[in-house]
Amino acid sequence: MLHTVSVTVRVDIDQGVVQLAITECLTAESHHCLIPLILRARGINPFGMVLVDLTAARHIEEAGLTSLRSAIEIVEHEEPGQPVRFLTPEVLPPCLMADAVAGGEHR
Ligand SMILES: [Zn+2]
């Protein structure tokens, strides 16, 4: 697998924030893995918010980010409660690894 996604969960009890720090690659394929984690993070933190931090991701595919956001929006609409916020870099990084291997095919 060229594009793998990795998630570190940090719970800040004082601030009431569950942070999911996403590293590696967020793609249209890998975004599915994040949905149950985000939902679980909402469950851990019934009074706070969930922060999905993508600023350290190595690769973000726009389709993956859009699909992830809309999936979470639907959940938030159906089950109002803890807000989920996304922190994204201004420019979505392409996959350097895929570039090296496939000559830019995965941009
Ligand atoms: Zn990638």
Image (spheres, rainbow, N blue to C red):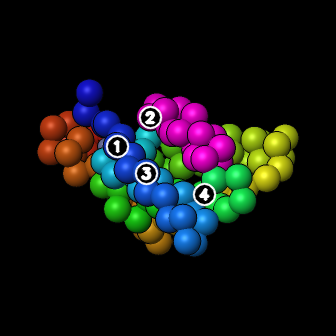
Q: Residues at badges 2 and 1 in contact (C-beta under 8 Å)? A: no
Q: Residues at badges 4 and 2 in contact (C-beta under 8 Å)? A: no
Residue under label 3: 9
- Image quadrant of residue 94? bottom left
Residue under label 1: 6
- Spatial separation of the CA atoms under disc 4 and disc 3: 10 Å
Q: Position of residue 79 (x, y in %)?
A: 82, 43
- What range of the chain is rendered magenta? 29-44
Q: Which label's residue is closer to the chain start, 2 or 3?
A: 3
Amino acid tagged 3 = Val
Label 4 CA crowd tier, 10 Å (few <14, some 14–19, many 20+)? many
Amino acid tagged 2 = Ser
The numbered disc on residue 30 is 2
Residue under label 4: 50
Q: Which label's residue is closer to the chain start, 4 or 3?
A: 3
- Spatial separation of the CA atoms under disc 3 and disc 1: 10 Å
Name the quarter where the N terminus is drawn: top left
Q: Nearer the viewer, residue 88 or 47?
A: 47
The furthest residue to the left: 100
Label 3 CA crowd tier, 10 Å (few <14, some 14–19, many 20+)? some
- Spatial separation of the CA atoms under disc 2 and disc 3: 17 Å
Identify the residue at image location x=49%, y=33%: 33
